[in-house]
């Protein structure tokens, strides 16, 4: 298991290639990448991501450990950035490796659902018109109920 | 204890972190104490349903005891991913 919280960019290809390398027991590797999107307005300049150093790493580790208990996983990777990002920049990625794809897919979805509302990150959208904190969505909280 | 604020809570109160000497027994007591102190705290804590609290870096709730707690953090619902 590897949990990384960093300001700098990450290399998606290199991370995916290195992930679970050398463990041939995993027949399935799922990766998910989150990207800063510019919504309909088309005027997003910067996405600023704040986090709670210390708690962030603890929360992500707990979420990944819980996933490892629920599913048969060979390995888990979570990378999440903070700081100032531009539209198109990668915010985060998760990867799961498992003997079987169902475990890998479900665990990746579980990680994403929990990471959205249980990991202490806050997004602020900065446009030419001003700056607004992104509000948490009810459906993100509701998504946890299925687990 | 150390009290930390994040996102708009930090902006509304005007600082990211402060050290507070308090006899507050619970998180709610601490919120009441801070709110009585200055308007900017009262404004930040006006709607507790819009806030979350962590005690020593674990999510908790407003009824929780502060006994033995070293670090309290207040913030809006998280928006990771």
Image (cartoon, helix red, strand yellow):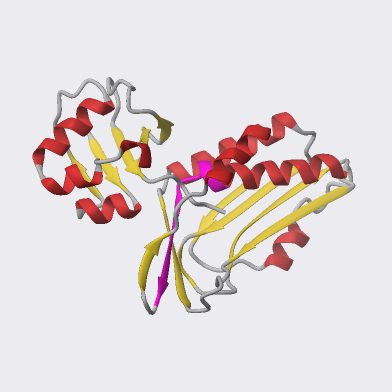
Give the magenta range.
Answer: A116-127
The quadrant of the rendering that contains the N terminus of chain A is top right
Q: In the displayed structure, does residue A72 sit left or right of residue A127?
A: right
> Is-magenta flag for residue A11?
no
- Residue A55, given in percent of the width and then of the height, sits at 44, 42
User: In the rendered view of the protein, which quadrant contains the C terminus of chain A?
Assistant: top right
The residue drawn where x is 46% and y is 47% is B78
Q: Residue at x 18, y 31 (%)?
A: B32
**Count of numbered badges drawn on the protein:** 0
Left or right: B6, with A144 as reference point: left
Q: Nearer the viewer, residue A123 or A83?
A: A123
| Residue drawn 27% across the image and 28% down it | B27
Locate residue A48 relative to residue A21 in the image: left or right. left
Q: Quadrant of residue A146?
A: top right
* Image quadrant in which you'd find residue A104: top right
Q: Residue at x 74, y 56 (%)?
A: A31
Q: Nearer the viewer, residue B70 or B4?
A: B4
Measured as percent of width and height from the top left, residue A73 is found at 78, 38
Query: Percent from the top left, x then y, of residue B15?
Result: 21, 53
> Is A112 situated above or below A33?
above
- Residue A93: which quarter of the image? bottom right
Residue lying at the far left in this picture: please name it: B37
Front residue (pair B58, A43): A43
Q: Position of residue A86 (x, y in %)?
A: 51, 74
């Amino acid at each position: 298991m590897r949990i990384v919280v960093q300001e700098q960019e990450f290399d998606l290809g290199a991370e995916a290639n290195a992930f679970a390398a050398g463990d041939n027991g995993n027949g399935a590797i799922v990766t998910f990448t989150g990207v800063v999107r510019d919504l309909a307005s088309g005027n997003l300049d910067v996405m600023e991501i704040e986090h709670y150093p210390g708690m962030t790493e603890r929360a992500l580790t707990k979420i990944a450990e819980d996933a490892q208990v629920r599913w048969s996983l060979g390995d888990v990777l979570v990378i999440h950035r903070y700081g100032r990002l531009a539209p198109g920049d990668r915010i985060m990625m998760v990867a799961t490796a498992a003997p079987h794809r169902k475990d890998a897919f479900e665990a990746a979805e579980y990680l994403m659902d929990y990471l959205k509302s249980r990991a202490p990150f806050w997004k602020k959208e900065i446009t030419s018109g001003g700056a607004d904190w992104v509000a948490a969505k009810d459906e993100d909280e509701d998504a946890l109920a299925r687990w | 204890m150390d009290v930390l604020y994040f996102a708009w809570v930090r902006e509304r109160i005007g600082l990211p972190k402060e050290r507070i000497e308090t006899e507050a027994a619970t998180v709610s007591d601490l919120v009441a104490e801070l709110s009585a102190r200055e308007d900017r705290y009262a404004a930040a804590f006006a709607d507790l349903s819009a806030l979350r609290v962590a005690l020593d870096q674990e999510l908790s709730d407003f009824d929780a005891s502060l006994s033995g707690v070293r670090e309290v953090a207040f913030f809006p619902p998280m928006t990771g991913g």
